[in-house]
Amino acid sequence: MSERGEQLDPIERPNKEPKSYFYSYSFSLKSGVQKQGIFFEYW
């Protein structure tokens, strides 16, 4: 059961990482600092 938990970690990480990057980059270009705060929360 411990090994399965490790497999779920890597799958959830890449799924959240690309989304955070996209949001941070898309919003960063529009707002800049106000959006950077959200990037940290999403991470």
Image (cartoon, rainbow, N blue to C red):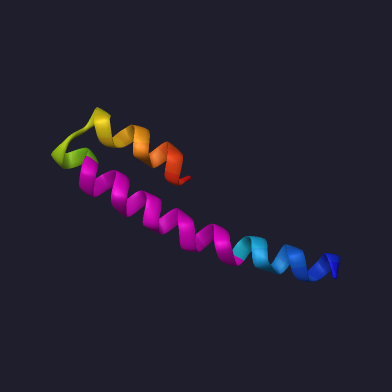
> Relative to residue 35, is residue 7 drawn left or right?
right
Q: Quadrant of residue 22?
A: bottom left
Percent x, y of residue 15:
48, 63
38 or 21, which lies in front? Answer: 38
Q: Residue furthest left?
A: 30
Give the residue drawn at x 26%, y 28%.
Answer: 33
Image location (x, y in percent) of residue 4: 77, 71
36 up-or-down from 12: above or below: above
Please report the residue visible at 55 percent of the width from the left and 58 percent of the height from the top.
13
Q: Is residue 9 magenta?
A: no
Residue drawn at point x = 70 percent, y = 68 percent: 7
Q: Position of residue 32 (x, y in %)?
A: 21, 32
Count the marks: how many?
0
Q: Is residue 37 left or right of residue 6?
A: left
Judge left or right: residue 27 versus residue 19.
left
Q: Is residue 32 above or below residue 6?
A: above
Q: Main secondary structure of the magenta part?
A: helix
Which residue occupies the extreme top position in the image?
33
Give the answer, above or below, for where 36 lies relative to 5. Answer: above
Q: Residue at x 56, y 62 (%)?
A: 12
Q: Is residue 15 above or below residue 34?
A: below
Q: Which residues are magenta?
A: 11-27
Residue 9 occupies quadrant: bottom right
Q: Quadrant of the N terminus?
A: bottom right
Q: Is residue 15 left or right of residue 12?
A: left
